[in-house]
Amino acid sequence: MERFNVSDCSIIELDKHHSDRKGNLTVVENGITLPFDVKRVYYLYDVPGGESRGSHAHKELEQLVVAASGSFRVTLDDGKNKRTFFLNRPYQGLFIKPGLWRDLDDFSSGAVCMVLASDVYRAEDYIRDYQEFLRYRSVL
Ligand code: TYD
């Protein structure tokens, strides 16, 4: 597995179709938008103000995180550096490479955090202990 750092992650501007009178539409399409094919979509919502989510890393999973509604903050950590992104536009997505710790917080009321993922749910892909994450990074 290649070793990625927080500097390898960035916000992708998604395709946005604008109509003056009828609103907007954003498309994410396999083979075009992302460097991975989407196998799973899940979304977080009704997160109480002040709560945080995430607090784990994935060994192989790639993800695109979108604020489909409202806003929240994502902090990525590669064991050496941290980088914080504020997501508040449904036509922007944060592309998260594998092997990075992530914390999500500062959810606005009504926020919907939509995640497009490169694989189905596999519990063994998670690292949920921060010390274990640091050990994992050191042997990557
Ligand atoms: P968890 O990953 O802990 O949420 P977060 O990291 O966003 O705070 O997931 C919460 C629960 O949902 C946990 O019991 C696992 C389950 N879950 C699935 O069954 N399938 C999935 O695709 C995801 C993302 C979670």
Image (cartoon, grey):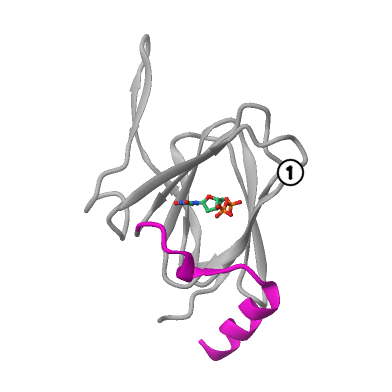
Query: Is the CB–ligand 1 distance for label 1 below 8 Å?
Result: no
Asked whether 135 falls inside the magenta stretch, the response is yes
SS category of the residue bearing label 1: loop
Q: Residues within 10 Å of mark 1 (few under 14, many from 20)?
A: few
Residue annotated with mark 1: 51
Q: Main secondary structure of the magenta part?
A: helix
Asked whether 42 falls inside the magenta stretch, the response is no
Q: Is residue 83 left or right of residue 8?
A: right
Relative to 22, say whether 2 is above or below. Answer: below
Seen at 41% across and 58% down, the residue is 121
Where, by quadrant of the figure, is residue 29 drawn? top left
Seen at 30% across and 53% down, the residue is 39
Instruction: Provide residue 132's location: percent of width, then percent of height.
Output: 64, 79
Closest to the observer, 42 or 10: 42
Relative to 121, say whether 115 is above or below. Answer: above
In the image, farthest residue toward the left: 31
Closest to the observer, 87 or 17: 87
Seen at 56% across and 67% down, the residue is 57
Relative to 9, say whether 59 is above or below. Answer: below
Q: Is residue 57 left or right of residue 129?
A: left
Closest to the observer, 93 or 19: 93
For the residue marked with disc 1, what is the amino acid?
Answer: Glu
Instruction: Provide residue 47's location: percent of width, then percent of height.
Output: 66, 37
> What is the magenta range?
120-140
In the image, farthest residue toward the bottom: 139
Relative to 137, say whether 83 is above or below. Answer: above
